Image (cartoon, rainbow, N blue to C red):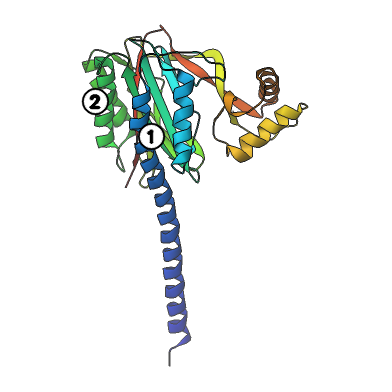
Amino acid sequence: MKSEREEGKQRSDVEGDGRRRGRSRMEEEVLKSYKTAESISNSCIPFAKSLVKEGAKALDIAERIEEKIRQLGGKPAWPVNISINENAAHYTPDVDDATVLKEGDFVKIDIGVHVDGYIWDKAFTICIGAKTHPLIEASELALEAALKLIKPGTRISEISEVVESVVTEAGFNPVRNLCGHGLERYNQHAWPSIPNGRNNIKDEIPADSVIAMEVFTTTGTGWVKESDLALIYQYVEEKPVRMWEARQILQKARQEFNGLPFAKRWLNITPVKAEFALKQLLDAGAIKAHRILKEQTDKPVAQTEETIIVK
């Protein structure tokens, strides 16, 4: 017969194995979601590149990519960003946007895919009418160098230093106040942040994290500033608001968009009512605006981004 101590130890071992198996199953499901999001993202990138050409409408490109994501079984983690020339980030076409791509434009396409909240983030730049461009190549090379360093224990400052070194050696500037970033469930900008420029951040890359590393390069001074225009918004918290449309937007932002960024054109509300409702929500602090980020000297910006699971 087994002693009570032996039986207790056996029960503990069995329970421990069960907990470990439970954690393993949970981790496998999370990894499966990430991998599905990655697969969808990988399919969307060549599709998106085929759309970026002279004469194409930015609105058509954004809507076709977003529809492609849905067809493949994912959801947009945010509105497709189509930031052109000096616009570095956060530009997505509005419902009446007539922007047409023209020769010489630096077109940055930033695509986020999520599956059950687990996000995969990729971006690329095309110079219309050219096979490539040194500004784009610099961002690609710097990203490649950064990805080699992203592993458990690497300091943030080490990655940022390599990015700036590669970019400046190519004759350009990194955009120093834009960063790579962590990804978490329903959180598109999680810790850690990895600046494009040199810093003294001693934080280390944690194991089992998901990092979206992105490099922005420019012929300008290397700093972006917020413009007055916002076309992308995000849920913050519940607040009382008077307009029925504002309450509907807040409900959508929380439930349909799961707290992730959304576009004005996703709301299916007349432009005038949408403006008033969004202003009411902003004033109440219920949502926040992601304003378009511009290079401060209006010089072109290139962007390259990839997501990596750190093991």
Residue wearing tag 2:
141
Left or right placement of residue 269 versus residue 307 in this view: right
Q: Amino acid at mark 1?
A: Cys
Q: Nearer the viewer, residue 269 or 262?
A: 269
Residue for point 40% across, 24% down: 109
* Residue drawn at the location 33% of the way across and 31% of the way down: 46
Q: Residue at x 66, y 29 (%)?
A: 286
Quarter of the N terminus within the rendering: bottom left
Give me the C-alpha separation between circle 2 and circle 1. 22 Å
Could you classify mark 2 by the number of other residues whose Cα lies within 10 Å: few (under 14), some (14-19), or many (20 or more)? some
Give the mark nearest the N terminus, 2 or 1: 1
Q: Which residue is mark 1?
A: 44
Identify which amino acid the numbered label 2 is placed on.
Leu
- Residue 197 seen in this snapshot: no
Residue 17, picture quadrant: bottom left
Against 51, is 226 above or below?
A: above
Q: Are marks 2 and 1 in contact (CB under 8 Å)?
A: no
Q: How packed is label 1: few (under 14 Cα within 10 Å), some, or many (20 or more)?
A: many
Q: Secondary structure at mark 2?
A: helix
Residue at left offset 66%, top offset 27%: 285
Q: Position of residue 152 (x, y in %)?
A: 31, 43
Tell me where residue 2 sits by quadrant: bottom left
Residue 83's disc is: none
Query: Residue 175: image x %, image y %?
Result: 37, 18
Instruction: Specify whether residue 16 is in view.
Output: yes
Residue 128 in the image, given as x and y percentages of width and height: 32, 14
